Amino acid sequence: MNTMGSGFRWSDESWGRALRCDPLSEVAQHLFTTRQLQLRATNVSAETSPAAVDAAWAQAAAAVGAPADALMRVKQVHGRQVRVLKAGAVDPAAGAARPEADALASNQPGIVLVVQVADCVPVLLADARRGAAGAAHAGWRGTAAGVTRATVETMTRELGTDPADLVVAIGPSIGVCCYTVGGELIDAFRSGGATDDELARWFRRTASGDLRLDLWTANRDQLLAAGVPADRIFTAGLCTQTNADTFDSYRAAGPNAGRMAALIAVPGAAGRPL
């Protein structure tokens, strides 16, 4: 679970390294940050003061060719709600608003969709034909609720996306190598509509009897079920807990863990990066 997936590469940014997916880069500017960029204010040091965090967000925006006020975020609540920002209908103050949701979708060129994670799965999507993009935050609750599939369905319904045109990058998160969970999660996923075959693919027993959850496979399966071609889905394959020296991990650091971001710039009608 420590081998980077095909199609991903490290890039050198002003603050350190970030992760990018080359096939997705052909459609939209994007990146997955690392713990080198402090995006959460804490009492630990001056480097994580509110002013320093604001500056860090500006750096992240600049790395995808946008100003800080182009960032569109949500108050993540571990559900499946998708915030939609349609071209021509985006309020200038939309960047300051943070409605409750766990995904965003837009076809408004010039804005940047953002989700934050610290073990949960960040999923970035781009529509090469329609010039739309999406971003989803999929922890176990969001995955059980089908947030990744909901993002594709919302882009299809609201933005005219054909799922076959999407390119999707599944970023670093806790891997099945480390994600030990309780049996009640199987019931939660079943209540969310998971079939027995899906549960068998997503949950695994170790030799010692521990139950592990494979969020990468679960979210990939949701994308496939929504109509995204298998050869257009790319998984980073990097576990945040295993690589806690590189990524922020709640399981590794507890409540004081930082937060990473996944950002994608809406590419516009030409379907090209800004």
Image (cartoon, helix red, strand yellow):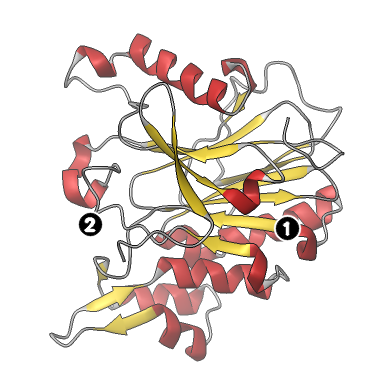
Camera sees residue 103 = yes
Q: Quadrant of residue 175?
A: bottom left
Which amino acid is tagged 1? Leu
- The answer to whether 221 is drawn above or below residue 60 in the figure is below
Residue occupying image coordinates x 56% and y 29%? 98
Say left or right for 195 vs 213: right
In the rendered image, which residue does mark 2 sit on?
A: 242
Q: Element type at marker 1?
A: strand
Instruction: Please provide percent x and percent y for residue 153.
Output: 73, 60
Which amino acid is tagged 2? Thr
Q: Nearer the viewer, residue 36 or 43?
A: 36
Camera sees residue 82 = no
Q: Element type at marker 2?
A: loop
Say left or right for 265 vs 250: right
In the rendered image, which residue does mark 1 sit on?
A: 166
Q: Quadrant of residue 19?
A: top left
Instruction: Please provide percent x and percent y for residue 64.
Output: 59, 29
Question: Dividing the image into 4 quarters, which one contains the C terminus?
Answer: top right
Instruction: Please provide percent x and percent y for residue 155.
Output: 76, 52
Say left or right for 113 vs 5: right
Instruction: Please provide percent x and percent y for residue 265.
Output: 66, 34
Residue density around tag 1, few if under 14, some if 14–19, many if 20 or more, within 10 Å: many
